[in-house]
């Protein structure tokens, strides 16, 4: 099965063979990429995520779950790379996913903040260690300026990867691929070919995202969103609320329907969303059952909140066929 998957790894989906008189969508034909979330987003389908922060048993339990992405917390939870590797092994041993992918996509929320270029470069080892665990993406919190974000992208790419104006070559060096390639179910050489950021590299299987979630970052929103190599962005509603003095909103956002959003927070959200759309970035935001349809229709396509009910409603709305 693994060889069959590898043989079709870089093929485009065949598409529906149905004619105009038979408009029903074709059944899902099986994995076309390693990263389930990229496959869905490239097909115009939103993705939905749940959370992780544990080790082997948690990974095994989540392997066949409903989520397309597991957002693994290393910002607020312990930064334990051995536990992260155990989590990834658990996903493989408990898999495949209902769609046939080896694992759900796993994106790590890093403990390093994008305060400036020097901070990110000094902590590039965190990026290296997370990627060496076989994860499928990274999320940089408190992205404050484009120089920090460029350093984040460079540290996430191998030295051979040089696409992207103004980025320079990647900073990941040869090595530390053995565990990651086993998690992905590919050879080391194949891992090097696809362990790059998407969509800058169309064959890439890594997703890099930024949180523009404080006043310093908001001032540089447009420049941050324009950095090559990013896959998605979010406006960080809780941190943005808290930083603006709205503690109650920070705790209630995305949890209680009908929470009134102060005008400056709505403006912050719209600024990040507009900049993301202008740079063709996917947009991460919360959704509840009451607003998932309107969120999707507004262009939000990475859905936070960790609620299966929300994913079920959204998938029906977009006519999704992938399990």
Image: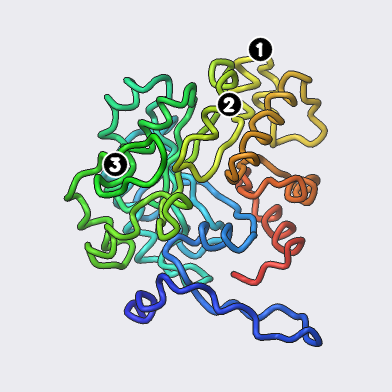
Q: Give how far across and how far down residue 144 sits, in percent.
A: 49, 22
Residue pointed to by mark 2: 221
Say which label, 1 or 2, has the lower sequence index.
Answer: 2
Residue 138 spot, x, y in % from top left: 42, 42
- The residue carrying pointer 1 sits among few (fewer than 14), some (14 to 19) or many (20 or more) residues within 10 Å by Cα, namely few
Position above or below: 8 against 307: below
The quarter holding residue 75 reads top left
Q: Quadrant of residue 272?
A: top right
What's the residue at 50%, 72% (across, down)?
12
What is the CA distance from the residue labelled 1 to the residue labelled 3?
39 Å
Label 1 to label 2: alpha-carbon separation: 20 Å
Q: Earlier in the sequence, mark 2 or mark 3?
A: 3
Residue occupied by mark 1 = 245
Q: Which residue is mark 3?
A: 170
The one of 82 and 244 positioned closer to us in this rendering: 244
Residue drawn at (45%, 33%) of the image: 140
Q: Residue at x 44, y 30 (%)?
A: 76
Q: Secondary structure at mark 1?
A: loop
Q: Earlier in the sequence, mark 1 or mark 3?
A: 3
Q: Is residue 231 left or right of residue 300?
A: left
Q: Residues within 10 Å of mark 2 (few under 14, many from 20)?
A: many
Q: 56 or 35, which lies in front?
A: 35
């Amino acid at each position: 099965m693994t060889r069959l998957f590898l043989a079709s790894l870089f093929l485009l989906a065949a598409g529906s063979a149905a004619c105009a008189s038979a408009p029903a969508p074709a059944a899902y034909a099986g994995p076309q990429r390693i990263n389930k979330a990229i496959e869905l987003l490239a097909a115009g389908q939103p993705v939905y995520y749940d959370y992780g922060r544990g080790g082997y048993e948690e990974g095994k339990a989540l392997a066949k779950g409903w989520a397309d992405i597991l957002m693994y917390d290393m910002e607020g939870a312990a930064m334990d790379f051995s536990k992260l590797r155990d989590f990834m092994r658990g996903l493989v041993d408990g898999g495949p996913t209902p769609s046939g992918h080896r694992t759900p996509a796993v994106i790590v929320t890093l403990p390093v903040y994008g305060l400036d270029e020097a901070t990110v470069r000094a902590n590039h080892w965190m990026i290296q260690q997370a990627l060496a665990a076989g994860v499928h993406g990274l999320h940089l919190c408190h992205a404050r300026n484009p120089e920090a974000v460029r350093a984040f992208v460079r540290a996430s790419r191998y030295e051979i990867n040089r696409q992207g104006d103004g980025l320079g070559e990647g900073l990941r060096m040869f090595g530390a691929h053995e565990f990651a390639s086993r998690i992905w179910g590919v050879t080391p050489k194949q891992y090097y070919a696809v362990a790059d950021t998407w969509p800058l590299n169309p064959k890439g299987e890594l997703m890099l995202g930024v949180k523009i979630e404080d006043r310093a970052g908001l001032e540089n929103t447009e420049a941050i969103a324009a950095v090559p190599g990013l896959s998605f962005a979010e406006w960080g509603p809780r941190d943005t609320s808290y930083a603006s003095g709205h503690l109650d909103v920070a705790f209630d956002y995305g949890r209680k329907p009908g929470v009134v959003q102060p005008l400056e927070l709505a403006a912050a959200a719209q600024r990040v969303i507009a900049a993301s759309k202008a740079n063709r970035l996917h947009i991460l935001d919360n959704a509840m059952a009451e607003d998932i349809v309107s969120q999707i229709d507004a262009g939000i396509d990475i859905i936070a909140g960790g609620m299966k009910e929300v994913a079920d409603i959204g998938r029906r709305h977009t006519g999704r066929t992938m399990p």
